[in-house]
Amino acid sequence: MNGIARIATVGLLLLIAGCATMGGVPEATPFELVGRVLVRTGNHAFSSNLRWRHEPQTEQIWLLSPLGQTLAYITEDDTGATLTAANGDVYHASSVAGLTQQALGWELPLVQLRYWVRGKPVPHQPAHTLQRDAKNRLTYLTQDGYRVAWLYSPANREDKLPRRLDLTGTGSEIRLVIDNWRSGSAAPPVPAVPATHHE
């Protein structure tokens, strides 16, 4: 193998390795959203405010009470995922989906949500029963074991971004309502460590 071929091979391997990080599907554009999440699993329900900051190689999620107290702080990078609860308990897993299943009892499909919150299917993954509205915005699909439905509102700053997502799959129903969206890395800092409180 000559030098040029060797460099090309190494470059290809690095590209493949990069695509394998953070769940196998990198999403390069940073964003931050603020909203609410409601989860139903059988006879149980969970709801909270939510703040999610996405960077190409890191995720940060705050689950917040109506008064702004941090109920759980979730991080993910190429070393795995960590959840810190308000009482100080710390959980670790290889992914956010496994972490939330372990700590909260329901699976948050964060790898897919990086795309679904933008009104897009996950690239390079089979998607079925796609439906679109008159503006060619995605309104329904089935992918990776989930049925996903989108609702849009003209109040969104970007017309193509959904206002609400409804996910059904893996034994749970998840509703994500997006109140505010910010693209780029200019989002203000948020305290990372939840405050411990006692009932």
Image (cartoon, rainbow, N blue to C red):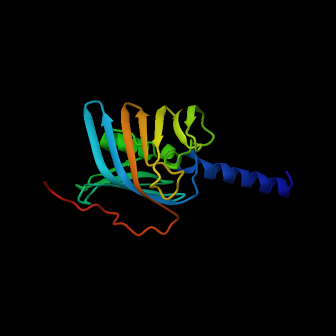
Snapshot quadrant of residue 174:
top left
In this rendered view, identify the residue nearer to me: 124 or 17: 124
Q: Which x, y percent locates residue 143? A: 53, 34
Name the quadrant of the C terminus: bottom left
Q: Residue at x 22, y 55 (%)?
A: 87
Residue 44, placed above or below residue 75: above
Residue 51 seen by the camera: yes
Q: Residue at x 37, y 53 (%)?
A: 35
Snapshot quadrant of residue 103:
top left
- Number of numbered tags placed on the structure image: 0
Q: Which x, y percent locates residue 145? A: 49, 31
Relative horizontal placement of residue 55, taking residue 97 as reference (left or right): right
Relative horizontal placement of residue 66, taking residue 190 as reference (left or right): left
In this rendered view, identify the residue nearer to me: 129 or 65: 129
Relative horizontal placement of residue 194, taking residue 126 as reference (left or right): left
Residue 94 seen by the camera: no
Relative horizontal placement of residue 194, taking residue 197 as reference (left or right): right
Q: Which x, y percent locates residue 74? A: 37, 54
